[in-house]
Amino acid sequence: MGKRLWVERNKDGSWDAFSEDGAHIKFGKDRGQFTPGDLMKIALAGCAALSSQFAIEHTLGEGKGARIVVDGTYDGDDNSYINFNEQLVVDATDASLSEEDAEKLKERIKRHIDKGCTVSRTYVHDTPVRLDVTVRR
């Protein structure tokens, strides 16, 4: 079983998400707040970032990373995303990589993400969601 997470509503209409180990993020639908759809895209980009980190640092050095932009196609009729697009850019301009080394890094990054990104793997599979509702009185 995964880490226990929960959300709680604030008086201003926003929400706070918490984890049992102390993580916290505020979200909602107002300006300056991440929506749940935004959080899905952040999860996808974050997973790619963490999964690719070893390959990038191994080649370019500790502390190096990537910029990952995620977008999605939203279907308003179905109220769902029908796909996501990720663009991962590694700035290796000061590393003097040969074209062959750049291609090897690109392939290593893809392999690391394909193997290690739980979020991407979950989105690709048809993942059932069970909802239990309890009304305490």
Image (cartoon, rainbow, N blue to C red):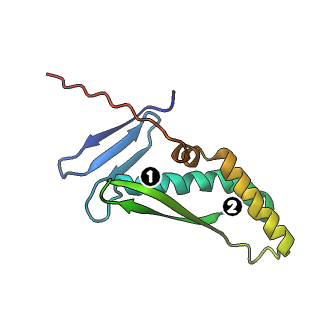
Q: Secondary structure at mark 2?
A: loop
Q: Amino acid at mark 1?
A: Met
Picture coordinates of residue 111 (x, y %)? 73, 52
Q: CA distance from mark 2 to mark 1?
A: 25 Å
Whether the residues at callouts 2 and 1 have beta carbons within 8 Å, the answer is: no
Whichever of labels 2 and 1 marks the residue nearer the N terminus, that label is 1
Residue for point 56% across, 63% down: 86
Q: Does residue 2 sit above or below 16 in this rendering?
A: above
Residue for point 68% across, 73% down: 91
Most extreme residue toward the top is: 137
Is 107 placed left or right of 38 in the picture? Answer: right
- Where on the picture, by quarter, is residue 58? bottom right
Q: Amino acid at mark 2?
A: Gly
Q: Secondary structure at mark 1?
A: helix
Is 12 placed left or right of 111 in the picture? Answer: left
- Where on the picture, by quarter, is residue 133? top left
Comparing 68 with 63, the one in front is 68
Which residue is labeled 1 in the image?
40
Image quadrant in which the C terminus is located: top left
Q: Residues within 10 Å of mark 1 (few under 14, many from 20)?
A: some
Picture coordinates of residue 62 (x, y %)? 73, 59
Most extreme residue toward the left is: 137
Picture coordinates of residue 57 (x, y %)? 74, 59
Q: Is residue 17 visible?
A: yes
Most extreme residue toward the front is: 77
Q: Residues within 10 Å of mark 2 (few under 14, many from 20)?
A: few
Picture coordinates of residue 27 (x, y %)? 33, 53
Residue for point 28% across, 40% down: 8
Is 101 placed left or right of 35 in the picture? Answer: right
Which residue is labeled 2 in the image?
63
Q: Does residue 98 sit above or below 109 in this rendering?
A: below
